[in-house]
Image: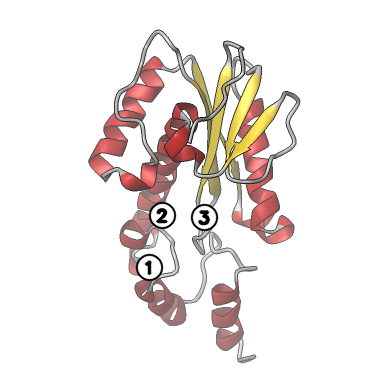
Amino acid sequence: MQIDRPNVSLIAGVDEVGRGPLVGDVVTAAVILDPTKPIAGLADSKKLTDKKRQALAIEIKEKALCYAYGRCSPTEIDELNILHATMLAMSRAVEALSTQPEFVFIDGNRLPKLTMPAQAVVKGDSLVAEISAASILAKVARDDEMLELDKRHPEYGFAGHKGYPTKAHFAALEQYGAIDEHRKSFKPVQRVLAQVNGEG
């Protein structure tokens, strides 16, 4: 699939990581690449090994014209719902860029509120280099946060499942209950909290 790129020089790509997990922030990144400093191997972060993602993240940070992160906390996710929180986090990432883009490519089929023209691209993390770069930065940042959370709460196994709804995560939730970083509005967490509180 060919993506029509606008005839402007400052194009940002935006992607998110962490819509599905039961714990932690939804993390987004925005990246404006430098056309004079190409980066080989950019792809959807989910299709790369952890080692390759880490290496590419370092290269992106070194070569990009600018990059920034946006996020929404579990509290904001619970208040807004995950879709609206993701859109807000994307807007925050673009606003945080030190150089504002003339155009923005967004991964997915919805556009957040932005002050410049933008286009949503389904599977954009495989089709648009800027979105691929953003997906890598967001994935590495969120995974690092899960490793930190794992150090504080090793009994949940966050280093392994990264907060996603796995059997191991469900088992830990049932055994230990929810921590502050859990998204209380997500049904699996609600179920466990109800059981713990004797409502289930």
Callout 2, which amino acid? Leu
Q: Dot 1: what SS?
A: helix
Q: Which residue is mark 3?
A: 24
Residue 29 vs 88, above or below: the answer is above
Q: CA distance from mark 2 to mark 1?
A: 9 Å
- In the rendered image, the residue lying farthest to the top is 36
Q: Quadrant of the C terminus?
A: bottom right
Q: Which mark is residue 65?
A: none
| Picture coordinates of residue 26, whole percent (x, y) | 55, 49
- Please tell me which residue is depicted at 43% across the width and 34% down the height of the picture: 132
| Picture coordinates of residue 186, whole percent (x, y) | 60, 69
For the residues bearing labels 2 and 1, Cβ distance under 8 angstroms: yes
Quadrant of res 98:
top right
Residue 20 vs 93, above or below: the answer is below
Left or right, residue 17 beside residue 85: left
For the residues bearing labels 2 and 3, Cβ distance under 8 angstroms: yes
Q: Dot 3: what SS?
A: loop
- Please tell me which residue is depicted at 65% across the width and 33% down the height of the picture: 119
Left or right, residue 29 beside residue 141: right
Mark 2 packing: few (<14 Cα in 10 Å), some, or many (20+)? many
Q: Which residue is mark 1?
A: 156
